[in-house]
């Protein structure tokens, strides 16, 4: 049995993500979510990583950018009350909650095309989720708890393309 130390946990998770992110597109998001999920219970996973929250909004912290630009891994730091915009994804994605509690709201367009919440699910520490690129899969992540939260996300585009290629925003 080998011991996995603090930097080794993150390296091991990033290696597992890399393998899953290079697999066939069919089922890739689920495999990436499983790769994240296998490490969410390691208290030392992000040891030495600076992932501070911001008073203004949730913050993305780059953990790894694939050299070929095929995917990027980020940690999102959430203060209580912070939330993403209502959005869908232009690329496949997977995430896991490392600490804290997030709420994921799902939305559908009403008769005028405005997003209306249809469901809400709690995502506690250890939970994972994934999805394909699909403008009809509309959701919002929010930290509605009283404490901070930290989640790990993988998107199927290079980090330098996050601004234009990740979120299809429906509402703030």
Image (cartoon, grey):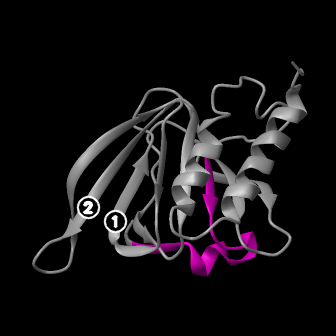
Q: Is residue 168 magenta?
A: yes
Question: Based on the displayed image, in which of its 4 quarters is residue 137 positioned?
Answer: bottom left
Residue 157 percent across, percent down from the top left: 66, 73
* Direction from residue 30 to residue 115 in the image, left or right: left
Q: Is residue 57 visible?
A: no
Residue drawn at (61%, 69%), measured in percent from left and top? 24
Percent coordinates x, y for residue 61 in the rendering: 73, 52
Query: Does 5 appear above or below 50?
Result: above
Picture layout, residue 52 above or below residue 94: above
Residue 144 sits above or below residue 120 on the image: above
Are there few (<14), some (14-19), or many (20+) residues within 10 Å of tag 1?
many
Return the residue at label 2: 107
Residue receiving disc 1? 138
Instruction: Give percent across and percent down for residue 26.
Output: 51, 68
Q: Residues within 10 Å of mark 2 (few under 14, many from 20)?
A: many
Nearer to me, 131 or 83? 131
Q: Residue furthest left?
A: 111
Q: Quadrant of residue 2?
A: top right
Marks 2/1 in contact by CB < 8 Å: the verdict is yes
The answer to which of marks 2 and 1 sits earlier in the sequence is 2
Q: How far apart are the alpha carbons under marks 2 and 1? A: 5 Å
**Which quadrant is home to the N terminus?**
top right
Q: Position of residue 71 (x, y in %)?
A: 70, 67
Task: Report the quarter where the C terminus lies.
Answer: bottom left
In the image, the segment drawn in magenta is 152-169
Q: Is residue 81 left or right of residue 149?
A: left
Task: Tell me the SS state at disc 2.
Answer: strand
């Amino acid at each position: 049995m080998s011991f996995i130390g603090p930097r080794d946990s993150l390296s091991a998770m990033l290696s597992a993500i890399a393998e899953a992110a290079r697999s066939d597109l069919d089922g890739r998001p689920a495999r990436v979510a499983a790769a994240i999920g296998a490490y969410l219970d390691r208290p030392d996973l992000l040891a030495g990583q600076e992932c501070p929250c911001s008073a203004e909004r949730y913050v993305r912290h780059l953990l790894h950018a694939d050299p070929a630009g095929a995917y990027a891994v980020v940690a999102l730091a959430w203060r209580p009350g912070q939330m993403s915009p209502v959005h869908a994804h232009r690329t496949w994605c997977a995430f896991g909650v490392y600490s804290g509690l997030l709420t994921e709201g799902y939305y559908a367009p009403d008769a005028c095309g405005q997003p209306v919440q249809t469901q809400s699910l709690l995502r506690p520490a250890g939970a994972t989720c994934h999805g394909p690129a699909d403008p009809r899969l509309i959701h919002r992540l929010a930290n509605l708890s009283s404490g901070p939260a930290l989640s790990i996300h993988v998107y199927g585009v290079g980090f330098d393309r996050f601004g234009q290629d990740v979120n299809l925003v429906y509402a703030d």
